[in-house]
Image (spheres, rainbow, N blue to C red):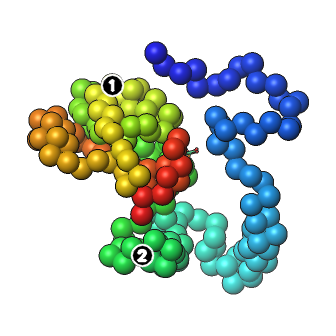
Amino acid sequence: MDVDLEDRNEDKSDTTTIKLHKGEPDTTMIPFNLLSKASQEIFDDEHGKQLGTYWTYADDQGNKELRHHIVNFLRHTCAISTLSYENIFITNGVSAILDQLCTMFLRAGDTILVECPSYLYALQIFRNHHLHIISYATDEDGLIIDSKFVNDVLEKAKPKMIYLVPTFQNPVNRIFI
Ligand SMILES: Cc1ncc(COP(=O)(O)O)c(C=O)c1O
């Protein structure tokens, strides 16, 4: 049975209960001052205004400087050293790019492998594309890669795509890298 994606009976006036089902960010962790300062710098940048730097389309893969920062961030925080900025693709959200990836690379009936459990809205997107979803067991290190996995899943089911959530896995909140 599908889970109802919206809680229609939610009491919006209740500000004391922490609602874990929606994954709303803790606003005390959002760096409002830094974001405001960064925006102001862009609005005040005379050189940028003349060149139109910030007011036109970015590279197809997203702002190059930001992609370099992301590579450095991953190198220092996750010890991932094999990435280059060319491997980074910036999007306006996970849901949009998942939908786009399914449109570009998959067809109805294709198999996609996900962790069990996996992110609710991603599953909904895969269902909308009429994919065959295989939900495979995980432990504290992520997908359990054993001979059953290799024989039954990789070789027999031949998934065309694997969807993993390696950091703050939703819903179990594990970090695999
Ligand atoms: C695993 C995962 N992916 C994506 C999102 C959010 O996606 P989007 O960028 O489309 O808002 C969430 C939000 O809780 C999430 O937990």
Q: Amino acid at mark 2?
A: Ala
Tag 1 residue: 130
The quarter of the picture where residue 84 lies is: bottom left
Q: With 26 as the anchor, is 127 left or right in this view?
A: left
Separation of marks 2 and 1 at Cα, in angstroms: 36 Å
Closer-to-camera residue (93/26): 26
Residue at the image position 53 percent from the left and 49 percent from the top: 173
Q: From the top left corner, tell me how far across and down residue 134 is, in percent.
A: 29, 33
Closer-to-camera residue (139/46): 139
Q: Is mark 2 within 8 Å of ligand 1?
A: no
Q: With 36 as the anchor, is 84 left or right in this view?
A: left
Q: From the top left corner, tell me how far across and down residue 118 is, in percent.
A: 44, 39
Query: Which of the two marks, 2 or 1, is nearer to us in this view?
Result: 2
Q: From the top left corner, tell me how far across and down residue 150 is, in percent.
A: 15, 45
The quarter of the picture where residue 12 lies is: top right
Q: Quadrant of ligand 1?
A: top right
Question: Within 10 angstroms of label 2, few (less than 14), some, or many (20 or more) residues?
Answer: few
Tag 2 residue: 79
Residue at the image position 36 percent from the left and 29 percent from the top: 129
Secondary structure state at the residue bearing disc 1: loop
The first of marks 2 and 1 along the sequence is: 2
The quarter in which the C terminus is drawn is bottom left
